[in-house]
């Protein structure tokens, strides 16, 4: 496209990127008829301080993974990505509605993928937009359908929850070990970011170890990892029990490899739906694991 440049993202792009993200995902929701779904599933809360804080975090840890597309009108697209251990992850990827389908997305993704060129593994959470799916498939990602749980928890179904405690920064080494076992890469500095905005619960006993972050955004349980299914189920129940009674909970990003989570959701009398894909390169769907939408 004439006048288009692809350049590294800077701190001063974050506000415009946030607006663009809102615009892009709002348009996608309308196109995919998502407004008919319950409110917690809809996108559009990217204006939160959490989103801005997270994007600035990527700029600090991975300046070479964050790119913008710009023309004379200003920012028209961006992609933020980062590398943890040997895994490249895509966080957010948007092109302005009306300019999509003209190759801007390909240029942006190619630049972000360059940042991960030494990586054996790749992860991303894909929307249902066929253009996104086409780009990811082209880049060698296999698509694994994502499901989500939503509804009001049947409090009478909540089992007795033991062996779960509050977590803190002193659990970061333990969490990095569980990350390496479940998804092959530690979250490293992302735990410090998550600890700033979310509550952490940990289970660490002779029978298994794991952790879950609770709340802080749209998702009731935005990230969960454990060394076995029993520990994972215990943490998910603890997260559901922690939600305000009579308010709907929302647990996205469940793959078919995590049937333990669907069993918990069914026992809690939640609804199960499908949305988007976990895109993976060089790895199998992590389990027992509920991936984070941006920090994976
Ligand atoms: C995903 C997104 C960033 C890609 O950017 P883009 O500029 O549209 O991407 P490109 O034009 O480079 O590539 C789009 C591809 O889809 C194809 N395409 C266009 N319209 C399509 C349609 N309706 N159905 C299927 N494929 C379509 C294009 O031909 C192109 O494929 P090709 O290069 O093999 O010909 C952009 O479409 C977007 O912002 N979507 C909404 C937000 C979103 O879903 N982001 C991804 C979050 S995971």
Image (cartoon, rainbow, N blue to C red):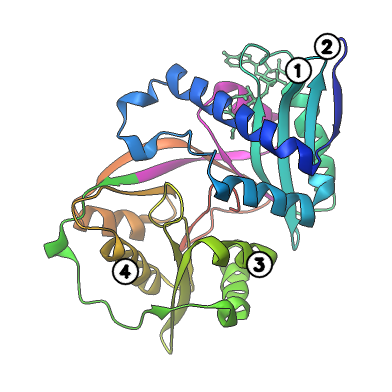
Q: State the separation of the CA atoms marked 3 and 1.
A: 33 Å
For marks 2 and 3 on the same chain, the one whose residue lies earlier in the sequence: 2
Q: In the rendered image, which residue does mark 2 sit on? A: 1
Q: Position of residue 121 (x, y in %)?
A: 71, 53
Q: In the rendered image, which residue does mark 3 sit on? A: 186
Q: Are marks 3 and 1 in contact (CB under 8 Å)?
A: no
Is 130 inside the magenta-drawn segment?
yes
Q: State the separation of the CA atoms marked 2 and 4.
A: 51 Å
Q: State the separation of the CA atoms marked 3 and 4.
A: 23 Å
Q: Quarter-wise, where is residue 11 in the image?
A: top right
Whether residue 196 is situated above or below residue 293 in the rendered picture: below
Helix, strand or loop for disc 1: loop
Q: Which portion, as a residue range, is magenta?
A: 122-148
Extreme-bottom residue of the structure = 206
Q: Residues within 10 Å of mark 4 (few under 14, many from 20)?
A: many
Helix, strand or loop for disc 3: loop
């Amino acid at each position: 496209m004439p006048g288009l440049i692809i350049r590294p993202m800077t701190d001063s792009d974050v506000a415009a990127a946030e607006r663009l993200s809102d615009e892009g995902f709002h348009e996608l929701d309308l196109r995919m008829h998502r407004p008919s779904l319950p409110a917690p599933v809809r996108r559009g809360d990217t204006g939160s301080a959490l989103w801005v804080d997270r994007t600035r975090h990527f700029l600090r840890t991975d300046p070479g993974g964050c790119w913008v597309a710009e023309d004379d009108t200003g920012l028209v697209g961006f992609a933020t990505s980062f590398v943890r251990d040997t895994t490249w992850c895509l966080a957010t990827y948007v092109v302005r509605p009306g300019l999509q389908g003209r190759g801007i997305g390909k240029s942006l993704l190619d630049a972000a993928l360059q940042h991960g060129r030494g990586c054996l593994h790749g992860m991303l959470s894909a929307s249902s937009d066929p253009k996104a799916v086409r780009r990811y498939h082209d880049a060698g990602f296999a698509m694994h359908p994502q499901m989500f749980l939503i509804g009001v928890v049947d409090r009478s179904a909540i089992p007795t929850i033991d062996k779960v405690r509050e977590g803190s920064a002193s659990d970061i080494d333990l969490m990095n070990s569980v990350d390496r076992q479940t998804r092959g890469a530690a979250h490293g500095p992302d735990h410090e970011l998550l600890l700033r905005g979310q509550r952490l619960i940990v289970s660490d006993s002779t029978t298994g170890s794991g952790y879950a972050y609770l709340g802080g955004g749209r998702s009731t349980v935005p990230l969960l990892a454990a060394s076995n299914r029993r520990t994972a189920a215990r943490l998910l129940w603890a997260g559901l029990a922690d939600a305000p009674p009579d308010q709907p909970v929302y647990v996205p990003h469940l793959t078919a490899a995590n049937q333990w989570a669907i069993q918990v959701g069914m026992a809690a009398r939640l609804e199960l739906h499908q949305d988007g894909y976990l895109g993976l390169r060089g790895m199998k769907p992590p389990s027992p694991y509920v991936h984070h939408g941006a920090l994976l």
